């Protein structure tokens, strides 16, 4: 368990052991989440990545993407469609 003091402006220094566990560097942002009646602090970039992974779960199967060349072909197709839409 780690302890930190809240300063007059609500600032708290995150203890080094916690920063290491969350892989936090200077300039990173943290997010405060309510979970089971408690507040949890997390690395916001990791939370965002997890959310994107969850949101895209199953999309590769749905789009029948089985390998990297399939993804490259899909990107080329999308770029071609976008280019065609921009033509007058």
Image (spheres, rainbow, N blue to C red):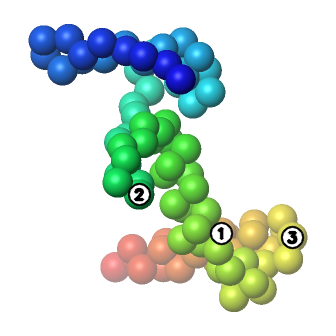
31 left or right of 19? left
85 left or right of 9? right
Residue 36 image label: 2
Q: Position of residue 16 (x, y in %)?
A: 54, 12
In this view of the protein, can residue 43 be seen by the observer? yes
22 left or right of 44? right
- Give the alpha-carbon distance from disc 3 to disc 2, as whole Å: 40 Å
Query: Badge 3 is on which residue?
Result: 67
Q: Are marks 2 and 1 in contact (CB under 8 Å)?
A: no
SS for dot 1: helix
Mark earlier in primary sequence (3, 2): 2
* Structural crowding at the residue carrying mark 1, measured as other residues with C-alpha within 10 Å and reported as few (<14), some (14–19) or many (≥20): few
Q: Position of residue 77 (x, y in %)?
A: 64, 77
Against 81, is 16 above or below?
above
- Give the alpha-carbon distance from disc 1 to disc 3, as whole Å: 13 Å
Against 15, is 41 above or below?
below
Say which of 86 and 70 sits in front: 70
Q: Position of residue 15 (x, y in %)?
A: 48, 14
Mark earlier in primary sequence (2, 1): 2
Mark earlier in primary sequence (1, 3): 3
* Structural crowding at the residue carrying mark 2, measured as other residues with C-alpha within 10 Å and reported as few (<14), some (14–19) or many (≥20): few
């Amino acid at each position: 368990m780690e302890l930190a003091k809240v300063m007059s402006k609500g600032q708290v220094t995150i203890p080094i052991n916690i920063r290491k566990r969350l892989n936090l560097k200077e300039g990173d942002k943290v997010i405060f989440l309510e979970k089971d009646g408690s507040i949890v602090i997390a690395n916001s970039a990791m939370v965002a990545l997890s959310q994107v992974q969850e949101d895209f779960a199953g999309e590769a199967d749905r789009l029948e993407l089985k390998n990297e060349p399939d993804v490259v072909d899909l990107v080329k197709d999308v770029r071609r469609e976008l280019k065609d839409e921009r033509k007058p």
